[in-house]
Image (cartoon, rainbow, N blue to C red):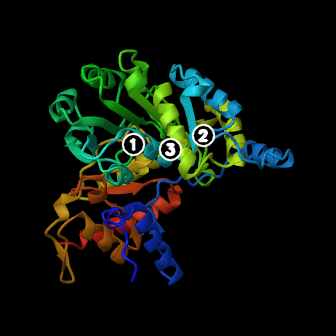
Amino acid sequence: MIELSNRLNAMEESATIAMSRKSRELKAAGKDIISLSLGEPDFNTPEFIKDAAKDAMDNNFTKYTPVPGYEDLREAISLKFKRDNDLNYSPDQIVASTGAKQSIANVVLSIVNKGDEVIIPAPFWVSYIEIVKVSEGTPVIVNAGIENDFKITAEQLEEAITPKTKMMIFSTPCNPTGSVYSQEELRSLADVIKKYPQLVVISDEIYEHINFTSKHSSLAQFEDVYEQVVTINGVSKAWAMTGWRLGYIGASKQIANACSKVQGQFTSAPSSISQKATIAALKADPAGLKDMITAFESRRKLVLSALSEIEGVITNVPEGAFYVFPDVSAFFGKAYNGKVIHGSNELAMYLLDEANVALVTGEAFGDPKCIRISYAASEETLTEAMRRVKVALEKLS
């Protein structure tokens, strides 16, 4: 048998992808599974974006492109940053990649050396930890509980910084919690960050437009930390383009050039067709997303209302994305049919087996007291899923 690398053996499989795979297997076996495990909008890509892709093919935009993306794509991203976020990133400060996940990996691989510490507020998106591990960095987890709306404070950030700290990675709106950092909260973090010029912060803003607050705020808006911040975004969530695989960064020229160098050796540029489709998406008025955002807000209300009727479940009110991240630790130690629930891993599997509902354990996101529920599904589906969850949880005693 071939001996696999230590790098691979140390890597955990994505919990969201693993649960999605398990759901598909059970469905194929004839089980009536409702999957609320993946972070994927259930809307279709708008027609005008698909038309742009068709035009690109008809006009033979089917060749290799510059590694960081077509110039007109980077110009469109630059204009989007200015229009939506009041951020000034010139086209040569932008790199388009095969999804925001690759964008993050490019940055980490460009900056983190073996033993460098990377601060990651918990709960966190599952891939942050594994990307840091591949780079041989050391994840430093800073816990933000539900009592603080799952957001870390400036004081917590400062306490976590050591001479070995090289980077911080966080998201707003957050996956898995839906929490959104306000401008005032970001300013307080920036006041700490500016004191440590060696610290690079990845601000993952892929859920920017799925935001139920008045306005999204970007960390890079503050001039005194602008050079230290890498802004991550893409089109998968807002424009229902998950399969198109197009993410991008705005960063200092030094970091952008470094990411382009890394990408040039791994994948080169993202799909030429996806790039042209993305230009159409980015040039569109974000006001066109209103109906989708309204639908998500209604679904959030439905899920929170259903959870409020289950004794022992604790929730906050997420202000963005399409997740609820309830504390379900009240059910730990309880049992049904001789099966004892010791933690969120076992609770997620219990709900899959007993309720035929696929959720994701909070342990994968850095908070073992919680589970993640994606409400990127129809209200009819969510209503039935929450009914099943309630019945299953009430069987535990």
Q: Specify few, some or many for label 2: CA neighbours under 10 Å numbering under 14, 14-19, or 20 or more.
A: few
Please report the residue visible at 39 percent of the width from the left and 46 percent of the height from the top: 175
Q: Is label 3 in contact with label 2 (beta carbons under 8 Å)?
A: no
Please report the residue visible at 44 percent of the width from the left and 43 percent of the height from the top: 104
Residue at mark 3 to residue at mark 1: CA–CA distance: 10 Å
Quadrant where the image shows the C terminus:
bottom left
Residue at mark 3 to residue at mark 2: CA–CA distance: 38 Å
- 339 horizontally vs 133: left or right: left
First in sequence, mark 2 or 1: give its number. Answer: 1
- 380 horizontally vs 164: left or right: right
Asked if residue 284 shows in the view, the reply is: no
Q: Position of residue 230 (x, y in %)?
A: 43, 31
Quadrant where the image shows the N terminus:
bottom left
The image quadrant that residue 200 belongs to is top left
Q: Which one is closest to the eye, mark 3 or mark 2?
A: 3
Instruction: Say which element carries label 2.
Output: helix
Please report the residue visible at 24 percent of the width from the left and 53 percent of the height from the top: 367
Instruction: Say which element carries label 3.
Output: helix
